[in-house]
Amino acid sequence: MTYWSIGSLKCEEDAYYLLLRAFQISCALVVGGELIFGSPYGSQTKYKGVLALNGRLTWVLMELVSPAALLYSYLAMDSFVPTTRSKSHSSVSTAFCALWLVHYANRALVYPLRQASRKPMHIGIGLVSCLFNALNGYLNGRWFSVFSSGLYGGDYLNEYTWQVILGLCLFVLGMAGNIYHDNILMRLRRPATGKPNNRYSVPVGGLFSMVSCPHYFCEAVEWTGYAILTQSPAAWTFALATLSNLLPRAYSIHKWYQREFPKYPNNRKAMIPYVI
């Protein structure tokens, strides 16, 4: 079974690679959809009515799907359907799963609970996000436990030393940068008075001097580092999906800043310093 082979769905392995390729193809659709229709959540939306759910609660629930799916896929004793490969765990693959859980502990719990407020989210966006997170968690968890073919054995750290060092540095720096710039945005929405501020302001500090959405840039760096660290096609697909989602969203937010604030700094790019 090669990486691009999708064959007939005779076993979980066939289904796995079919889902992986579908995930990769969907990235192009996400970019096109967000460029045409705009971002489906956040400051660019105004959902109301019975289909508008509590934004904070919906965020928590949909983000928790990812670590839950990863853990179940990684720890499940049997394949979901018959497979020709045996399941294996190692200290390396378990450490990679732990990094995933650390990210989502912040993203699903700490981050939304620290926000001053969060706009309502359409039920359709919440359901699509749950599906994305479930599939993403499954693909990465199953790669670590079944389809990596013993990649993460005792020699992994020796054979992929520079990838481990570079990938781990990018992951840690990306996560730290994401949290740092999220904090800047949170302080704008909740000033020293401690009361939520519903008015938007131009953020300053850190990489905000260069781009409108440095928190997105740092998250993309984080997952690119994770892909380098793990050498996993599922992780690379997630890094691509992250960029496909955040780049057009950052562009949309950048244009919104320019419309709302006539004196918005002209030297700022949307997401990637000096590029776009």
Image (tube, grey):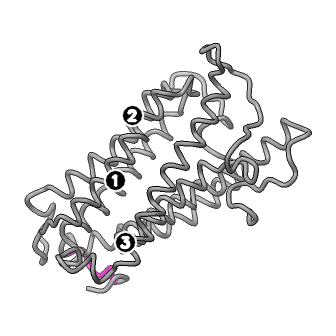
Q: Mark 1 and 2 residues: CB-CB less than 8 Å, in contact?
A: no
Mark closer to the chain start, 3 or 1? 1
In the rendered structure, the answer to whether residue 41 lies left or right of residue 86 reads right
Q: Secondary structure at mark 2?
A: helix
Mark closer to the chain start, 2 or 3? 2
Tell me, yes or no, whether the highlighted magenta stretch contains residue 6: yes
| Residue at figure coordinates x 70%, y 42% from the top left | 205
The residue positioned farthest toward the bottom in the image shown: 2
Q: CA–CA distance between discs 3 and 1? A: 15 Å
Tell me, yes or no, whether the highlighted magenta stretch contains residue 185: no
Picture coordinates of residue 127, whole percent (x, y): 42, 41
Kind of residue at disc 1: Trp
Q: Nearer the viewer, residue 99 or 18?
A: 99
Q: In front of the other: label 3 or label 1?
A: 3
Region rendered in magenta: 5-10
Picture coordinates of residue 236, whole percent (x, y): 43, 69
Kind of residue at disc 3: Val
Picture coordinates of residue 257, whole percent (x, y): 79, 41
Q: Nearer the viewer, residue 18 or 243?
A: 243
| Residue at figure coordinates x 73%, y 23% from the top left | 199
Where does the C terminus fall, quadrant-wise? Answer: bottom right
Q: Can you identify the residue that label 2 sits on? A: 109
Q: Can you identify the residue that label 3 sits on? A: 164
Q: CA–CA distance between discs 2 and 3? A: 28 Å
Picture coordinates of residue 167, whole percent (x, y): 43, 68
In the rendered structure, the answer to whether residue 10 lies left or right of residue 229 reads left
Q: Can you identify the residue that label 1 sits on? A: 100
Kind of residue at disc 2: Leu
| Residue at figure coordinates x 27%, y 57% from the top left | 97
Q: Badge 2 local density, few (<14 within 10 Å), some, or many (20+)?
A: some
